[in-house]
Image: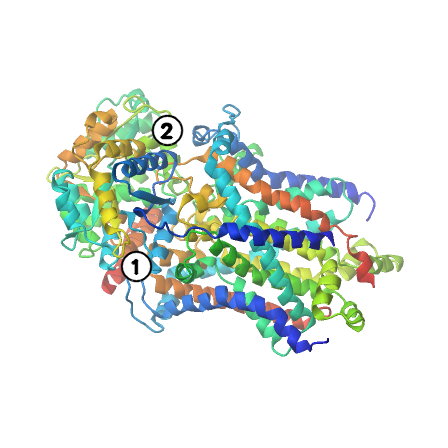
Amino acid sequence: MPPGAKGALLAGLSVLAVLFCIPTIGVLLSSFKGTAEIAAGHLWFGTSGFTLDNYAEILSKRSVYQYLRNTVLVTVPASVVSIGLGTLAGYVFAKLPFRGSRVVFIGVVAGMFFPAQILLVPLFRLFLGLGLLNTLWPMIIVHSALGIPICTLLMRNFLAAVPDALREAAILEGANELQVLLRVILPVSLPALAVLGTLQFTWIWNDFLWPLIFTQSDDKRTIMLGLVSMKGQYSVAWGVQGALSLVASFPTLFVFLRFQRYFIRGMTMGSVKG
Amino acid sequence: MSFLKKVGAVLGALAVTGTLLVGVPARAAGKEVTISHYFTGDLGHDAITKIFADFEKKTGTHVVDSPTGHEDFKTAILVMAAGRNLPDVFSYWAGARTQFVVDSGALRPIDDMWKSSGLDAVVPAAIAKGATLYNGKRYLVPFGYHYAGLFYNKKVLAKAGITAAPGTWPEFLAACKTLKAAGVTPIALGSKNRWPGQFWFDYLILRTAGPEYRAKLMAGQASYTDPEVKAAMKLWKDLVDAGYFAKNANADDWTDAADKVSRGDAAMTLMGTWITGYWDGLKQKAGEDYDFYEFPVIDPRVPKAAVGPVDGLVISGNAKNAEGAKELLAFLITDTQAQAAWAKAQGALSPNVKVDPAGYSSVMRRALDVVSSAKAFAFNYDLATTPPAAEVGLSMFAEFMNNPADYPQQLARAQTQVSEVFKKK
Amino acid sequence: MQRSLRWWRLALLSLPMAVYVAIVAWPLLDSFYYSVTNWNGFSADYRIVGLENFRALYSDPLVRGALRNTMVWTVAAALLPNLLGLALAIALERHVPGSRLFKSIFYLPVCLSAVVVGQIWVWIYQPDWGALNGILGALGAPQSQRAWLAEPGTALYSIIVAWSWQQTGLSMVIYLAGLTSVPQDLVEAAALDGAGYWRRLWHVVLPMLKPATVVVVALSVINSLKGFDIVYIMTGGGPFHASDTLAVAMYDESFKRYRMGYGAAISVLLFLITLGVVATYFRELRKLDELTV
């Protein structure tokens, strides 16, 4: 790195980071203020009226814990399954292509090309017919399926960059494809898996459309649906909503912090050199 | 490798939790009624949950309720309808929206329940006629209704020297002029979500052309380019040109406009009685900090009409527990305790005439009097005309606030689109 | 026992494809079917109307406007968050002090749900007490203050900025992962050959980031085309349809105007456009391809 540039870089990053933080600070502020304060226009620059009431309110509601529990029960399995299925498909498209595999690949990736609202009615009918409405199953299954396109895309691209020599060497040593995938290829793809894990967890966690359709009773709801439902037809609850949205974002942030060390270089250098 | 071990552990946990997740899709025996509604928000939700609990105590029927925010509710109910799995009961807006659903054959008529519960004596005639009868049959039970009036900040008006509520249009214009001279924006309008602008359109047409003409316009039998409509829009434009409206109406939500009034930056806002629920929640006092007056009379020969939405409950055509649903509806409208609690929580008026008016705040009591003595009760625009046409009008009102001078072209464009809608019918 | 490649292809692909077809592909086609009907969602019967919906689409000014907005957003989406995300990834991949904190700050918006993001940016753009106008005023530029979300000229761009704020962290994270697969020895060899920092960046690092770039651009373009929640929260598609996108138009038609058939036609249009954009992108990429299949 050119000398002196490091200081300039740090300064630039800091300015950008501060600007980037402004909206997040806004959410933070709103969680500590009452709805009346915000209604009076004092969100950003007023200093009176700090309160912990919003947090007290959500932490004392039993339904909030229920929502969080449901969201975990949906998000973790769906993330794991979608990444797993995407890895299987990505491996085939990257390492075992066949005639027409490119078309099939685009067909799979095309599953990302539309807003989820399009599938609302057909999937509602499907799970109604299966008798699974108002359970957590439809959300898990739908999120697993909807994650396949992005997981396939990412895994295929990263696996394609892994040298073929690795696979060939393993085959020569007598491994079958599955063993190659699990023992040789996957350990090298940890950054991609970590990225996918983080992203899928975040997207599934933050979704409220499928819980809206598939749950009817309160005890099956997820946290985002609870957040969205706080707004009444003729009332608002800014402060509590702010607090709840922060609490609801802790898990996704936590997942990022835990996984992000896999993005750091140095993790995989050894095997790629092979 | 440890990462893979974690994956394996999670998969194992998945298998375990899988057994816990097989939910109980439906209650085996025992009576229960399913209901979907849009009564969310703290006060409303608590109140209705308690009302359902009372119902269960009285009848032993359990209410499975599914509250959803009213915007998302529109999505959810349509998906359920499309999947042919509507709940037994659901809340809906009386008027053109319910008409639409009735015409689609999705609802069950409730004439029998209406008679057996003697609702003719419970629901005021004007509301019963407009809100519950569709194609000659009863389909909807009103749950609560609202009235749209000019809600104002008492202190602001008093400070500007306005002692009497303006009753006629010239008095209203004079009041606005006084307020502006005193440094206060006379009118706040928060049309970000488009719908608040409709009350201005409604009242201007009702006070000049009358309820019968308006009904024709809503039904597609009159045109938005008629001189009556143009005259009403011109009056509105005059108000905007005189600077009586707060700037950037389209940037504010209705709550922002209400906040402007309660802060004293603006004097009044044309809004429904639910604003009292909002203001009470912000510790404003009815009658002391805020009050309302009726939209001024413009043409004294035209009968004075009141505008407001009616929230109702309907029973779906293939309800699993139709009897239980009818029981629930009867309870919700006839039980005066439930009605009183509900009205209070929502800042609404009860459609049950037997509810004691003493339970209302002074402001709401006056609203009740106004509605009772009104010559006609009309639904606000987006509930009075069929939904596809309402979408056109609502956008036009927002466009008008952005550029009032363009209103003849806006009306012409709206008419083109609306006539398409009515042609298809 | 060595099974044939073909067997393995089938074995590994069968489960993902089965789930995908059952839950995504088939319902999608089922939904597209309604685009040739006049179904309104509520009633049990409807008529098949052939291509009438599509003909109406073609001449509908609202759809044209939504299409235009969607295209603008797509171009912005391909550029804005990705260039910024790339720059951030490169800057933070080296050992800058506090890089972990920086990464978290730039990634945090991704963790927030669209509902929260939309609401907080509404409060930033608020004309009277919002942060943006406040800052402009403090910087001595009150004439630049506007009603950002209420003016048809600025509403869409304001939303795009808010969306990019959230999308940048995503691009950054994918680029960070991509940078881990850039072989250090290649970079070092170039340095030894006398290539300066920018040369090394341009000729060695960036080309090796092509797979990541493919993903990042495809992702942001696709996300922008689907963009719905954030528009809905911030403007509802307003003022009077000025910030409508095809996704918003589809929702309005289906759920507010009770025209599910017409809404389905819009979703078909949106799908075909996305397909076209991405297929073209992949084809162009294949022409310049050196590394990947």
Q: Quadrant of residue C203?
A: bottom right
Say whether mark 2 and mark 1 are on the same chain: no
- Name the quadrant containing residue B306: top left
In-front residue for pair B366/A119 = A119
Q: Secondary structure at mark 2?
A: helix
Residue at 40% x, 56% y: name it: C251
Contact, CB < 8 Å: mark 1 with mark 2? no
Which residue is at a point 25% across and 43% down the rendered structure image? B328
Amino acid carrying mark 2 in the image = Gly
Which quadrant is home to the C terminus of chain B? bottom left
| Outermost residue toward the left in this view | B301
Q: Quarter of the image containing the N terminus of chain B?
A: bottom right
Residue for badge 1: C42
Asked whether A211 or B197 is in front, the reply is: A211
> Disc 1 to disc 2, how far (Cα)?
37 Å
Please name the residue that numbered disc 2 is placed on.
B281
Residue C8 screen position, x and y as percent: 66, 73
